[in-house]
Image (cartoon, coloured by chain):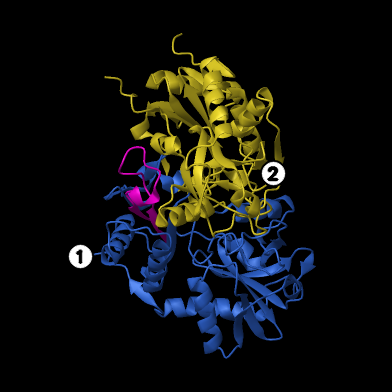
Chain colours: A yellow, B blue
Amino acid sequence: MNLFANGAAYVGREFVPIAQASISVLDWGFTRSDAVYDVVHVFHGAFFRLDDHLDRFSRSMQARRLQPPEDRAAIARILHQCVRLSALRDAYVAMVCSRGRPRVGGSRRPDDCENHFIAYAIPWIDVIAQDVQERGAHLWVASTPRIPDECKDPTVKNYQWSDLTSGLLEAHDHGFDTAILCDAAGYITEGPGFNIFIVKDGRVLTPDRGSLHGVTRASVLELCEMLDIPSGVEPIPRDMLDDADEVFAATTAGGVMPVSRVGTRILGNDRPGPISMRLKDLYWKRHAQGWHATPVQYED
Amino acid sequence: MNLFANGAAYVGREFVPIAQASISVLDWGFTRSDAVYDVVHVFHGAFFRLDDHLDRFSRSMQARRLQPPEDRAAIARILHQCVRLSALRDAYVAMVCSRGRPRVGGSRRPDDCENHFIAYAIPWIDVIAQDVQERGAHLWVASTPRIPDECKDPTVKNYQWSDLTSGLLEAHDHGFDTAILCDAAGYITEGPGFNIFIVKDGRVLTPDRGSLHGVTRASVLELCEMLDIPSGVEPIPRDMLDDADEVFAATTAGGVMPVSRVGTRILGNDRPGPISMRLKDLYWKRHAQGWHATPVQYED
């Protein structure tokens, strides 16, 4: 029996089974949500776009002035080791840098804190369940507005999900699978754990604001180029979402996930749309071909 | 040697020394900052306004649909027990309810999670150090705008401090002690861990927006009544802060804390103002007299 079968974590500079991976209730990463993170997936034994995730993780840390003792090479080694210990072939692999606690008793200064790095590999997660992806997700347009970019930079991947969680609760109250948030000016942004795309008159569009610069989002834009589908990153008013021919979500934790309903509106035949399906199929086909893949070092 | 001397915590339904109090790195209280909390202080062996803190904690939990197994009476007993184990006479006592993790594997629904309660008592914390309180804090007016109330309700005490932390980093960069945030419309709100008050022409005012309904804030308003000082809760534009005769901060973790500088402006004689000092002195005098006090049950 592999003790790490449910997942392997690196925390406090040690590798432990995921059930033992914890942080202090006094850690500012918890008490101030003063932490950044990133998630890369492992599909059939290989990381997908590992360097892109490491790049973004570095940018997030820099933006919040977080610096753990482990450098980029060490972080990459630790991620490999977490997956290797878990022996998972398909995995959700997280990297986190937390502010930690002040080195000096009584200090309330972020700069006085001992930042620390956490990582873990756990079994694959779908942000939207597979069966829901099959029929197309039902998307609720939340009344909670997205936190403005000026108040909290959405390109810095963070755990401060209050607005997203409020949207998710609304969605579930109305019998929907998940939610999309609009900003105060009425432009669509993102949902809890995914970027959003609309298809209109053959063009594939994703919002330029209130959103993470998703690695899967970038992958979708690459796939559009391969398929000669015109695409763009631009302001998308709520009206355009309501008027879309197709809608889909994109995330590391699930890939390209078609939507079949937006609020009371039923898209197409209440099924995933054709362009969404082409992108989804090509996304997984390319995965199988080793696109942007970094094989996990399972052996020495 | 008391194992709990550095602090005592209740976590996972057990009492443990604070150094052992931790939560899973997979807990949504961490990975989505999906948690609410409250802090009550113990001064000279008695809780201050314990019922008010328990009331607010209940409201916060309700607002986020969090419900731990422990009811209010149990929570109160646990808080007493944490302080008792620590044997602290002056303490910072926190209560937290976290979303926890889904009971059902694979669920991404907040409603499927097992909410859990955490509490701890640790030695007294001053949000602004005592020596800084003596000379008056230097307050930086942050360029980061406060997250709008519509996006995240500031009366629900939460750990999502991104905007406050950004303000704090700015303040430290400029050699200031702490920061105050304005909302997008230019009204002042609160700082990292405290409410703000201004004194103008003998009136004591605190913002009606973007702020926690602080228990110390309520106490200050009561003290104003006792001292026949007119007071109000109202919109306060940035101009009024710049033009104030006095400024002070108020928090459970430090009480009434005078400010002597706001940005480049020096208030009064670069010392705490007279009304601020009257309020501060009466605040502690009343404490010593047992005002709103609930003695800690140190013995059976």
Q: Residue at x 49, y 75 (%)?
A: B284
Residue A279 visible in the current orientation: yes
Q: Is residue A1 above or below residue A147?
A: above
Label 2, label 1: how far apart the Cα atoms are = 62 Å
Residue identified by numbered label 1: B300
* Pointer 2 chain: A
Question: Please, what secondary structure does the residue beneath circle 1 have?
Answer: loop
- Pick the residue in front: A99 or A181: A181
Q: Residue A186, percent across and down?
A: 65, 57
In this view, the mark in front (2 or 1): 2
Q: Residue A41, percent across and down?
A: 50, 27
Q: Amino acid at mark 2?
A: Asp
**In the rendered structure, does residue A215 fall within the stretch colored magenta?**
no
Horizontal side, residue A122 vs residue A235: left or right: left
Label ID, residue A208: 2
Q: Quadrant of residue A182?
A: bottom right
**In the rendered structure, does residue B111 fall within the stretch colored magenta?**
yes
- Pick the residue in front: A7 or B293: A7
User: Could you classify mark 2 by the number of other residues whose Cα lies within 10 Å: few (under 14), some (14-19), or many (20 or more)?
Assistant: some
Residue range corresponding to the magenta coloring: B92-120
